[in-house]
Image (tube, rainbow, N blue to C red):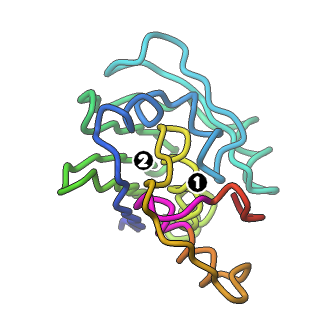
Amino acid sequence: MASTTTYAQFIALDAGALWQVLGDPSRLPEWHSGYRSVTVDDAIAVGAEGSYVQTHRVAGPLHRRFAPPFTITAYNPGRHMQLTQKEPVGATIIDFHLTPADGGCVVTDKVTVTGPASRTLRSAVPHVTDRVDFARLARLAGLAPVDDALSVVLAGGSGALGQHLAADLACRGGIDRSSSPAA
């Protein structure tokens, strides 16, 4: 039995710019709210191993203490990176894909947990929780608002819907998130 969660977001940057951040697992905590720390023991390539600690207040400390290392099981620079962590009764597979699109790329974060406890374990595995993580990635990769971007005011924009809308606009280069409290 497997349980999968997939998130995707268009970002108005080319794959090369995004890959400078996305292609280095140790940079995940800079933009991905699910990771407190990530280390890779060797050069980033298929077969390299590493470890991560989640920000989840219960799973993070347990994972740091008991989890085996992850292995980079796929690495196609500028396109795809897959981290696989074997568990006693299954595995956790974290996939990042970049797909070129008109004016940028679609970034996809897919988390699959296999085994009999997959649904329970998936809730503790880091995955993009909202579009704000993608907006952080876009900013780190160098996306700046376009010169002729519209000024947008999201009334009540500090709620979940407002944050998602603002983050989506930021990923498209449409607004400056620097003045937003969620930035």
Q: Position of residue 159 (x, y in %)?
A: 71, 83
Callout 2–callout 1 Cβ contact below 8 Å: yes
- For disc 2, the marked residue is 94
Q: Which residues are magenta?
A: 167-176
Rendered position, 73 above or below 93: above
Name the mark on residue 126. Answer: 1
Q: Residue at point 58% right, 50% down? A: 136
Q: Is residue 7 found left or right of 160 in the rendered image?
A: left
- Magenta region includes residue 172: yes
Quarter of the image with the C terminus in it: bottom right
Location of residue 19 (image quadrant): top left
Depth check: 52 or 164 in front? 164
Which residue is at the far bottom? 155
Q: Residue at point 36% right, 47% down? A: 95
Q: Helix, strand, or loop for circle 2?
A: strand
Q: Is residue 147 found left or right of 45 in the rendered image?
A: right
Kindly tell me whether residue 94 is visible in this rendering. yes
Q: Amino acid at mark 1?
A: Pro
Q: Is residue 61 found left or right of 31 in the rendered image?
A: right
